[in-house]
Image: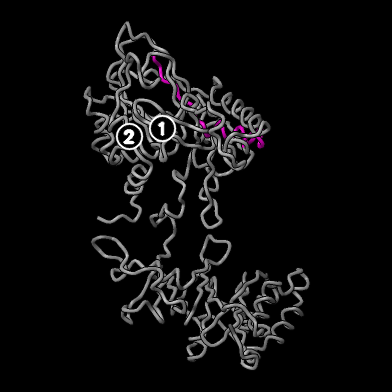
Amino acid sequence: MLRSSRALQRASFASSYNAARRVITVTQPRRVISTATTVTPTPAQKKGLRANGKSNGIGIGANRRTTCSSSSSNSSGTPPARGIATRHISSDELRRELQEDTHSRASGTALPASMIRDIDAVESSEGPNVRDTVELGGSACHGSNARIIAVTLPGRDAPLELDAVAARDSCVCPLCVDVHSKQKNFQLTDIPADISADWTLSPDAQELEIRWRNDVPGFPAEHKTTFSLKPVENAVPDSIYHPLEPVERRIWDSATITAQNKWTDYNEYMTSDTALESTLSHLGRYGLVFLHNVPDSEDSVENVISRIGIPKRTFYGQTFDVKSRPQAKNIAYTHQRLGLHMDLMYVTNPPHLQLLHSLRARSPGGASIFSDSLRAAHALFASDPAAFAALASLPVPFHYRNDSQSYFKWRPTIELAAPLAGRSPNPAPLTADPTTTTTTTTTTPPIKCINYSPQFQAPLLPSTLLSLPPSSSAPAPYSPAQTRRLHAALRKFTALVEAPDALFELRLEEGQCVIFDNRRVLHARRAFDASKGERWLRGAYVDDDVFFSRGRVLRGEGVGA
């Protein structure tokens, strides 16, 4: 806060001008507030400015995009950056000159309200915390004793505000992060609340360097923190700031996935990181990918997983065999038709990936069918938002009670992504494939995953009604109106995922392996005649954390050795 009104009345305003931009900088000892407005001088003004180096006291920046001003350079007598002419005037005089500027009146660009607010904030004893604001230009900029650093960077429509506490917590120098374990050597709560920053923004070095006042106890006085200012295309992004992965999911129908389907040779997948990254990226984008020439071995599916990470072990084991069995404990282990579904909806953390390797394909029938549930959810939102809302808010029970196991879980059919600090984790989770004519005219709410497994859906009501909890706030039973809403919405969703143009059908031949996103892609199977030959798939699962970790490593996202 700025308290002394007498000192504030002596505030000076340094102003600079170039051919396209006026920057008004309000300076106080160790404090800077800057704001800008775009103006265009008349030809006569340009001529006068070039000849005299100033006009109405407004300086010209020759061949310079922006001006950085700091109190340290002004107070120490250091001259402004080369090619910049400045002068100091009172706030009243500045206000009057700008408002009386004939060009401003002609163009309708009087002193903008945002600039007036900044000037008023400096003049007011009740003004906000002062921010150091700079724009990345051709010369270094400095700030001193700052609690908040607001850096205007190319490509951003507003200053990037860095709180001193957050900036200090983000230091990854060897003093702050152990070079071997890669873990922090201090806690967020160790940072003093009154920490402040002396900083330098250097366009040449492409970095923001910060030295600390009242640093974490125990750290040396010379400790500094640096942030890269490299353009995004030259820097490795960090996906933890885009927490819903994959960040670019493309919806598909039968025609799209037929055209975009990806097959990777097993040997390339196992030996080439380039092939692996391409395969996993495609898997993240479409949720479906295939391998061929997979060796005829019961260990092959685990070898495929080893390139991603570790398998997910369930009560089915580390791997499982999908083949027809008498008195099967799971409908998948029969020769019957198996409708579209997802696996293990009844556990707390269902597997993210499912792998199925075809070891024997010698019986007639048994083709695999896949459908993109995200496409169905997107279409449902576009056609019936109320039905979409019902599936996102009315959960469905799933269970498995057999073979000495008892699992149970309520889940919404459409599970929306929870916002992170008020921001959507994925502003555009669904996009049409650019190679198709599919159009998306509505913005679907960010979807985390789909939960759909009719074969493992538990009854909405228990067989013993008196076992229901007495509280009306319990998830079941639903009221008649809620039940009808859920039923109608599920019927519409089912019609969308089962529509002929949504289904991609393929018979897995021996030596082929499918990998699909179990939280997105529904899978089914046509009936087969087990009496005329063997059909045997060996399956396994992978958790989301394992899959995402491998993808980040392959993309080089800030991983250590």
Which of disc 2 and disc 1 is earlier in sequence?
A: 2
Q: Residue at x 62, y 41 (%)?
A: 472
How busy is the neighbourhood of tag 2: few (under 14 within 10 Å), some, or many (20 plus)? some
Under mark 1, the amino acid is: Leu
Q: Name the quadrant containing residue 97.
A: bottom right
- Asked whether the viewer can see residue 287, the reply is no
Give yes or no for contact between labels 1 and 2 (Cβ–Cβ under 8 Å).
Answer: yes
x and y percent of residue 64 in the render? 53, 73
Region in magenta: 366-388
- In reply to whether residue 377 is colored magenta, the answer given is yes
How busy is the neighbourhood of tag 1: few (under 14 within 10 Å), some, or many (20 plus)? many
x and y percent of residue 495 in the render? 58, 23
Q: Name the quadrant containing residue 8.
A: bottom right
- Asked whether the viewer can see residue 208, the reply is yes
Seen in the image, is 192 located left or right of residue 375? left
Seen in the image, is 257 located left or right of residue 113? left
Q: Residue at x 32, y 18 (%)?
A: 323
Q: Which residue is under mark 1? A: 344
Quadrant that contains the C terminus: bottom left
Report the front residue among 58 and 287.
287
Q: Residue furthest bottom?
A: 6
x and y percent of residue 102 in the render? 77, 76
Magenta stretch mostly in which secondary structure?
Answer: helix
Under mark 2, the amino acid is: Thr
Q: CA distance from mark 1 to mark 2?
A: 9 Å
